Each structure stands twice: as structure tokens, then as C-alpha cells.
Amino acid sequence: MSFFGKAYEPFVPFGGSDPDFAKLREVANGLAPHTEHNDIRIIDLDAERAVAQIPDVTHLHNHVGTVHAAALYLGAEFCAAAAFVGTAAAHLERVEWMVVRDCRAVYTRPATGTITATATVDLRAVRELAARGEPGRLDVDAKAVLRDPGGAVVGKVYFDYVCQIS
């Protein structure tokens, strides 16, 4: 067992060959205290992507009244991690933990209103997870696109995760 334990254990009963994506979404929404405290929620999760909402609330605004970059990052990262859960649902019993190694955020315009993050995971990592028989580390790349209520892109965040598999 690693330092982080089996952080993905709560997802395992709802993964497998016939995943319950609603339950996986429910578990994700209950696990992360920072997102729960800020009312950032996964609103859709399937085998291809996750969608999160970052609410338009004063405590997530910056000094000029737009959604703060830290709130945008928090929503994007939560969404990308949830996208991995959905994409790798058939193999969650092998996932011990996953953490951000590196990221790059590009904010393209002021973020106002309720922001929607849509995240996807590079499927090569999931294919490697499925094919690999031995434990070890796995690199996982993900991307989240942030949109305002009108659908305009306000940012993109790219993640480089490292995942421990058993």
C-alpha cells in the first residue's frame, strides 16, 4: 500500500464492466472538500468526459468581479480527475491514487457567470492501464475547457497526472 492508500477505493463498487456513472458522479461530488465547500459540482459523467459547474458566487470572484483563476483551476482539475474516473471506470479496482504532476492554464477572456468545465482524458493512458499486467506508475494527460454561459471559451487547462496502479 502506498503513502496515499487506496484513494480510489470509494469508486470501485460502481465501476467495472457496467459502470454506474450516476453513482460515480455522486461519489466524486462527496469526496473533495475544497470543491464541496465552494459548491463546484460534477453535473455529468460518462465514459468519454466529465462536466462540472463553477458557480457565480461572490466568494469565488477576484478583485475585479470575475471568477478567480484559482476557482477556474479548481473546477478544471476536479473535472479532469472525474473524467479519468469515467474513462477508466472498468479498471478502477487497480487505481491506487492519481495526483497532478504539472499543469498549464491559459485564460483567454474574463470569466463571468456560471462557468462550465468539460474535461477529457487521453485514451492512450486508459488503454495502457487495461493492457498492463504489473503494478507501477502511469502517466495520464487530461484537458479541461472552460466556457461562460454564452458558450465562449474563457480558458483551457492541461494536466499531466501520475497514477499508481496495483
Image (cartoon, rainbow, N blue to C red):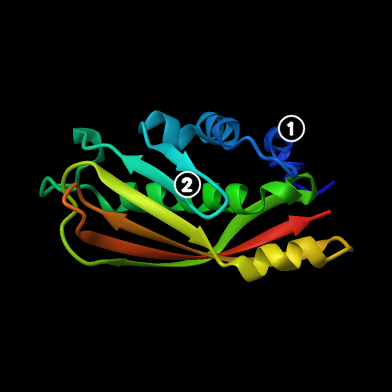
Horizontally, residue 73 falls left or right of residue 13, namely left
Q: Foreground: 12 or 76?
A: 12
Q: Residue at x 35, y 60 (%)?
A: 145
Mark toward the viewer: 2 or 1: 1
Which of the 4 image quadrants contains residue 6?
top right
- Above or below residue 25? Residue 156 is below
Residue 50: give its label.
Answer: none
Residue 78: give its label.
Answer: 2
- Above or below residue 23? Residue 52 is below
Mark 2 and mark 1: span between their CA atoms?
Answer: 20 Å
Which of the 4 image quadrants contains residue 127?
bottom right
Q: Foreground: 135 or 127?
A: 127
Classify mark 1: residues with Cα within 10 Å, few (<14), some (14-19) or many (20+).
few
Q: Residue at x 27, y 37 (%)?
A: 55
| Secondary structure of residue under mark 2 | helix
Please, what is the three-letter code of the amino acid marked with disc 1? Pro
Horizontally, residue 38 falls left or right of residue 161, namely left
* Direction right: furthest residue: 134
Residue 13: give its label.
Answer: 1
Exactly how many numbered labels are in the figure? 2
Q: Residue at x 16, y 48 (%)?
A: 112
Where residue 21 appears, x then y in whole percent? 58, 38
Classify mark 2: residues with Cα within 10 Å, few (<14), some (14-19) or many (20+).
many
Where residue 153 appears, x then y in whole percent? 24, 61
Answer whether labels 2 and 1 touch (C-beta < 8 Å): no
| Lower sequence index among marks 2 and 1 | 1
Where residue 31 appears, x then y in whole percent? 56, 33
* Direction front: furthest residue: 18
Where residue 98 appears, x then y in whole percent? 65, 53
Please, what is the three-letter code of the amino acid marked with disc 2? Phe
